Amino acid sequence: MTTGMIEGDAADARERILAAALDLVTRGGVAALTTRAVAVAAGVQAPTLYRLFGDKGGLLDAVAERGLAQWIAQKQAAVPLPDPVEDLRASWQGYVAFGLAHPAVFTIMTAAARDRPPPPAASAGIAVLRARVSRLARAGRLRVPEERAVALIHAVGTGVVQTLLSLPPAERHDGVAELALRAVEAVLLDAPGTDNKTAALAVGLLAHLPASDGLTPGERLILAELLTRLAVSERPNDRDR
């Protein structure tokens, strides 16, 4: 048997295992995914499963990667909305809708106390969020540093979906996700026409700084530090004082 045939057999077995595992978690949740059930459904022996995925954790990661990758690809290919705020809102709504429609995949992706790096699709999802937040900053609409905004949006969005998934479908209120988004926007976004725009202007300049050719690396570093101080010193509660 040639190396190509062996690799082809392994790839075929991997696809069958992933398809079987994704079907099991979709129908029965994470608890339904046992190595025995997957092996039987995929028509393979348990040693094959361990050889291809290492352990159950590796298989869970691969299942989540498969379930999330297509959605992430759609997000990456989507044309951004002209208004960066509306673009962020659409992304939020899509994230919540995906989590509620794919509870098992979402649960795997957001499992606490992971002992391995996040799958590539999860990192790609954060990259998409960073791009949307960066658009807000460049438009002068963000009043906290970009990384803080990304962390807050991701944390609140994940918490909203986890909370809704913990409730019976009949008790999930449609307005919860919208109210959470409004709360996030109140902290992060600078409304047009406000008098105190120091933080938003500082964050906006920070977003444009990497593309500036008129400064030396040292000057760029100093300016970045000063702008960051301005951005973090302008607390939302200070705006009305």
Image: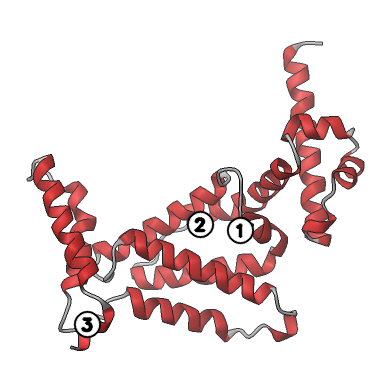
**Quadrant of the rendered structure where residue 150 is?**
bottom left
Visible residue check, residue 126? yes
Between circles 3 and 1, the one closer to the viewer is: 3
Q: Residues within 10 Å of mark 1 (few under 14, many from 20)?
A: some
Q: Quadrant of residue 216?
A: top left
Residue farthest along the top direction in this orientation: 2
Display coloring: secondary structure
Q: Which residue is mark 3?
A: 238
Q: Which residue is at 82% across, 51% downward? A: 33
Answer yes or no: is residue 77 visible: no
- Which residue appears at 73% of the width and 34% of the height? 54
Q: CA distance from mark 1 to mark 2?
A: 19 Å
Q: Which residue is mark 1?
A: 110
Of marks 3 and 1, which one's residue comes earlier in the chain?
Answer: 1
The mark that comes first in sequence, 3 or 2, is 2
Classed neighbour count for the residue bearing mark 3: other residues with Cα under 10 Å, few (<14), some (14–19), many (≥20): few
- Select label 3 or label 2 by which is in front: 3
Depth order, front residue of 229/45: 229
